[in-house]
Image (cartoon, rainbow, N blue to C red):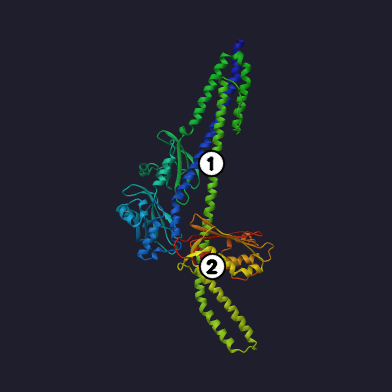
Amino acid sequence: MRIRTRLLLLLIALAAVPTVATGLLAWRGAERALAESVDEQHRRTALAEAEHAATYVLSLATELDAALLHQDPTALGPAAAQEFLTRVFLRRDRIAQVGLFDAQAHLVASVFVDDPEAFARQEPQFRRHDTVTAQEVEDFQRRAAELLAQMPAGRTYAVSAPYLTAVRQRPAVVVAARTPESHGGGLAAELGLEELSQRLALGGESRERVFLLDAQGRLLLDGDVQRAHLREDFSAKLPEARGARRPGQSHYEEDGHTWLAAFSPVPELGWVAVVARPREAALAPLQALSRSTFEVLGLTLVGVLVLSPLLARALARPIARLAEGARELARGNLGHRITLKRRDELGDLAHAFNDMGQALELAHRELLGFNEQLAAQVEERTRELKQTQAQLSRSQRLAAMGDMAAGMAHEMNNPLAAILGNVQLMLMDLPEEDPSRRMLNTVHHQAQRIATIVRELQLLSERQQSGRSPVDLHRMLNRLLESRGPELTQVGVRVDRHFHSGEVRVLADTQALGDVFSRLLGNALNALKDRPERTLTLATHVVDEQLVRVEVRDTGRGIPREHLERIFNPFFTTKQQWTGKGLSLAICHRVIEDHGGSISLQSEQGVGTTVTLVLPTAPAQGSLV
């Protein structure tokens, strides 16, 4: 065998074969990385679509449930019930109609738009709602009655399966909620899913398909309404997605193509969100990379055959560097770049490797950024939901305590009045030197203390809905500070005022709101006792000209972290000595809630406490108090 031939074979063995092997290994590694990246992206998309679908539907259920929390519409008269339904109907544009049903699931009242001009004259906001036909109204009432009748005991809301409206063929669901006292009746609304369907259609760009399945694997909603109307069955194609309770990946065959699919359950609805894409479309970049790689390898082999004597030494080092670069990429070092100043095929191959590494690094950064953004959104949404849940739970506890307090006060007032009256009569008949008089005075004092507690309980149960007028908030706070001025001076408390520039008015019951600030000021003074720094700060801020935020800050003892969740509970106190009844903050919470506002508390032990009140501002017209 000639030396040239041997050299050629040697170069092929030492240069071409390792290059081909390295290219194949890099291609396989890139294939695995790209497949994993595509699967992860599909999974995240499916999870996002599932969360969006759940939020889209369950937010209405939460709103209906909240609307029934403090109001039983079945107990209202016809006009009041119609007004209640109108307020619910006008909350969202995508509500087509609402209905109120009694305990036997019979329709009591309903609101829908069948004549836009007539409704527009009655209420301009009705123009934002779609019209419905008589057949669609009848179909909605039937579905809503069946949903309420089949709602399990203990459930406060339910959602029907998606359907197409009878005449206009629009996707929709029925969302129903009922009051805790009801055993069959409640409030129902038809929620249009066109916006959700449009989102699914937009998500299906670049041959990607996004759709929703029911628990049996049948198609519920698709960007293509006609396709959803056929109720395509995916139970055999995607058995893993049927009734899935956790996210996953799978694939199925359709129209001679293999589709890569990721699915995620829709919370509380029993649906499954699926994101699918043809395998050849998902792995198209890898196919392009493989063609480019093999083209470069072909040019390399031609160069070896033609210039084997000259390239024997020149090829060894560049190929080794290319192999090392491929290994770095395979190990995950996406920032590694190959510096090869050549103007031949090897240089092109090095540029191809660098471009591939840059593309993979950019894709990796985008995925990390998307992951961080999604995690931040989930954390923010979780925090908001926890705050809302805590507020609702606290309101429910106070409402239940108020009902019990009203009953207790009613039952205790009569015997307590008898005790006080009899003790007073006995004291009038006894001489001053009688030894029994001291015991009767003690009984009289304790009975009066019980009467005070009963009055506090009545304040906790009462809901003030009338007698409100525009109140100058700054004037009220200044009067309160002036009335407590001697007490503040005596204990050495420095008062800082940081009021909003200009007049701030709120619509309130002057006595009730003044009592709230008086109680908060009393709590702050108690916390400032025996403190080295005694500073009380009152601040007001106007938010969007519709809300005013009032902050009462002190540098007192603070509240232990483990007590913060119970701070608004009736009869709970953190005072060092039991001098009160533990009802002040509970009463403040009830009064502020009745005024349409909110109250929150932040405290750090040894640093101080800040109580924040948010109240709606009063209209521009009206007299000041």
Q: Which residue is mark 1?
A: 370
Is residue 517 or residue 50 the one in the foreground?
Answer: 517
Q: CA distance from mark 1 to mark 2?
A: 49 Å
Label 1 residue SS: helix
Q: Tell me if 210 is positioned left or right of 310 in this view.
A: left
Q: x and y percent of residue 399 in the render?
A: 50, 65
Is residue 374 or residue 530 the one in the foreground?
Answer: 530
Q: Identify the residue shown where x is 59% and y is 18%.
A: 12
Q: x and y percent of residue 257 in the render?
A: 43, 33
Q: Within 10 Å of the Cα at label 1, are there few (<14), some (14-19), or many (20+) other Cα atoms? A: some
440 vs 294: above or below? below
Q: Within 10 Å of the Cα at label 2, are there few (<14), some (14-19), or many (20+) other Cα atoms? A: some
Q: Which mark is residue 514?
A: 2
150 vs 229: above or below? below
Q: Is residue 175 visible?
A: yes
226 vs 358: above or below? below
Is residue 172 or residue 86 the one in the foreground?
Answer: 86
Mark 1 residue type: Phe
